[in-house]
Each structure stands twice: as structure tokens, then as C-alpha cells.
Image (cartoon, grey):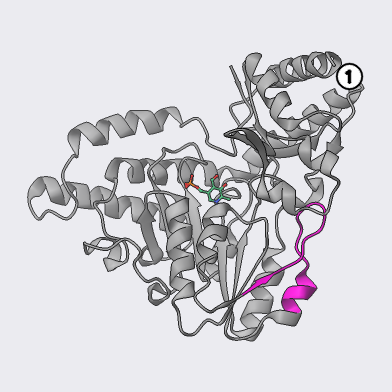
Amino acid sequence: MIFFDNASSTPPFAEVITEFNKISSENYGNPSSTHKIGRLSRSILDDARDSIATTLGINATKILFTSSATEANNTIIHSLLYNSKIDKILTTKIEHESIIKPLLIQNNKSIVVIPINKNGLLDINYIAAQIDEKSCVALTIANNELGTIQPFQQVIELSKSKGAVTFFDCVQIVGKSSLEFISQADLVSVSSHKIHGLKGAAAIICKNRGLISPFIIGGEQEFAKRAGTENVAAIHCFALALKRYQTNWMQNYSILHEYRNIFLDELKSKSIQFEINTPLEHSIPNILNLSFPGFESEHLQLALDQEGICVSGGSACSSQSIVMSHVMDSLPISDNTKKSAIRFSFSIFNTRDEITECIHHLKSILNRR
Ligand code: PLP
């Protein structure tokens, strides 16, 4: 099996599995309990919070654990929509659905759509013209389908100069870039299973907890901002994975960048016709979104799957019809390019041989027509 779908989830580090088993079996106490077993769980949770804070260069009290980045994003958008100091939310059409869907509630806020180019890069001048002190700029910093990195530093500077709030979904950028900018953003979401941790743990990082209104209620956990017993073992593993992956981001970057280049070189050497939707100079290194005009993304994806190669397409089967992803659908590119888009996303655990094998199968699938 070749797994080139690492933007959807990643294989956990071996130590993550070992630690998960250990903590789950030995430290099963509820971290809110006051007895010894509970206090042990509490200290594991506190240590994980401290470790994440150290890795990200922030204060531990800024971290609120959630079950997923979807929950983190929903909570953040919900908080913004019900914040009387915010009138306007500036965003794009290619945000993750966990941002787009809750924004539909609107709650009398003005939702301003920032234009994007064919690679998903936003128009910073548009933000400059629209932003004011009652705005929030809500952005997915590295797009999960295209890999496009938005100009976050410019957004931070513009927002600071106007007194606006910034919300950055950083799920895909962790481990592939310096994250110094996170301490300058007001609200951030990150997820564990995208960085070789486990599913079931994620976090909101907030400069000021007053910005968050609880979305899940019925308990005082997480500074009374997110009710529900914390997933101690998964959070412990989240901290481990983040420390290992983020500390080595430069090394990760060069491995992933090399894989992407090898992939492109091999495609060219096999004379395969393709278009590149990812802006190579403004993207995280592990995502390569390509179109193979004349072929349907869905069919290519299935044919690769039959060869044991996992990738993700720009469209998916939904009951009887094929539904285009909202990201591809929002790009000012031809229908042909949209319909034939495939996302290859690599991890540091992939190998060059897997790339060669993938290209070999891709070539024969494309030749079958
Ligand atoms: N944000 C981005 C950019 C993502 O890619 C994803 C997952 O694909 C999410 C949010 C949601 O993350 P989770 O799987 O932790 O809910």
C-alpha cells in the first residue's frame, strides 16, 4: 500500500502508539477527579499543555484542547459570530468546510469574501481596503487541497495596524514551517492526527480566552471554555508528536520538498501531460495538486486505489452524482482542470521507490484510455 494522502491523516510515530497504550492502561483516571489517580491524569494533561506551549513559544494558559480541528474551528467561528465587538469576517471561499459551514449562520455579521487567484492565493489589497477595527480575518494558512500558503505576515501586520482580530487555521502548516507567527495571531487551530499524532486531540490557541465562548457546555474543563473529559492519552501523544515534528520542521521541509520535486521530475521524464494547481513557490512542500485534463479525478483516484495507491481527488462520489470539491470549484480555472484534479500529499515516511511505483501505475492508467 502506498499512502499519498497525508493531508487527510498521517501514520502515527511509533513512540506515539507506545505512549498511547501506556497512558491508556496506566493513567485512566479522570483529570478532574481529586484523588490520586485523577491527579496523575491531571499532571499528564498539564505536562502536555506545557510541552505544546514550549514547542510553539506561547503561554500554556492560551491552549484549549478540543477533540478535532473541526471542533476548534466551529468553536472559534461560533465565538466570532456572537462577539458584539466584531461586525465583519473576512475570509475566502477555499477555507476548510469547518470554517465555511458555521459561517453560514452569519448572525447579522457581514461575511466578506476575499478574491483568490487560480492557485488559491488571496488578494492582500482587498483585505487592506476592507479591514477595520471591528473585523476578523479568518483564514486557512496552508490550504488542505492546494497547499497554498496565504501571506500570513502581511495579514498580521494589516490586522495589527487596524486593531482587527486574526484567526488562522494552522492544521496543515505545522511541521513544515517556522511557527513563530502563531504567537502574533489572536486565534489558531491545530490538529494532532495531521502531524503523526492520533485522532481525537486538537487545540485552539487563543491570545485572550475572552474571545472564546464555549460551544460544548456542561463542565468546567479547559478553563470552562470546552466541557467534556479531556482525552488525556491522545493529548499526551499530541504533545509528543508536535515536539518531534515541529522541532524538525526544516528537515521535514527538505525531505518533503525533495519528494515533490522527484515526483514532478518523474512525471516529466515519462512524458505525462499534467497541469500544476499548487503554487510551488507559495505552498507547504508535501502537497501537490495536479490536473490530468481529459481524465476524471474520481476515476483516476479509483484506478490508483485498485493499484494500492491512496490519493485524494478534487471531487467525490455522493449518491448518484460526482460532487466537485468547493475548493476546486472556487478557483478561476477551466472545468476541465477542476474535474481532473488529484491531490498527492506526502509524509516523511514515504520513500522514493513509492514515488517511482506510483508514476509507473499512473502512466499505465492514463495510457489505458
Ligand atoms: N482544517 C484543515 C485545513 C484541515 O485540513 C482539516 C482536516 O482535513 C481540518 C481543519 C479538520 O481537522 P480534524 O480532522 O482534526 O477535524
Q: Is residue 276 visible?
A: no
- 104 lies above or below 157: above
- Say which of 149 and 259 sits in front: 149
Furthest toward the right, the residue is: 271
- Find residue 76 and report its horizontal and vertical position in percent: 46, 65
Looking at the rendered image, the quarter that the N terminus falls into is: top right
- In the rendered image, residue 216 lying in the magenta stretch gets the answer no
- Please tell me in which quadrant of the rendered image residue 15 appears: top left
* Quadrant housing residue 276: top right
Residue located at (72% from left, 22% from top):
355
Type of amino acid at the residue the image marks with label 1: Lys
Residue 120 colored magenta?
A: yes
Q: Residue at x 70, y 42 (%)?
A: 285
Q: Position of residue 32 (x, y in %)?
A: 17, 55
**Which of the two residues, 26 or 137, is positioned nearer the viewer here?**
137
* Residue 3, image x, y percentages: 60, 25
Residue at image coords 74%, 78%: 128
Mark 1: secondary structure: loop
Give the x, y percent position of residue 61: 35, 66
Give the residue drawn at x 46%, y 60%. 74
Residues packed near mark 1 inside 10 Å, few (<14), some (14 to 19) or many (20 plus) = few
Quarter of the image for residue 219 reads: bottom left
The span picked out in magenta is 111-128
Quadrant location, the C terminus = top right
Q: Disc 1 marks which residue?
A: 270
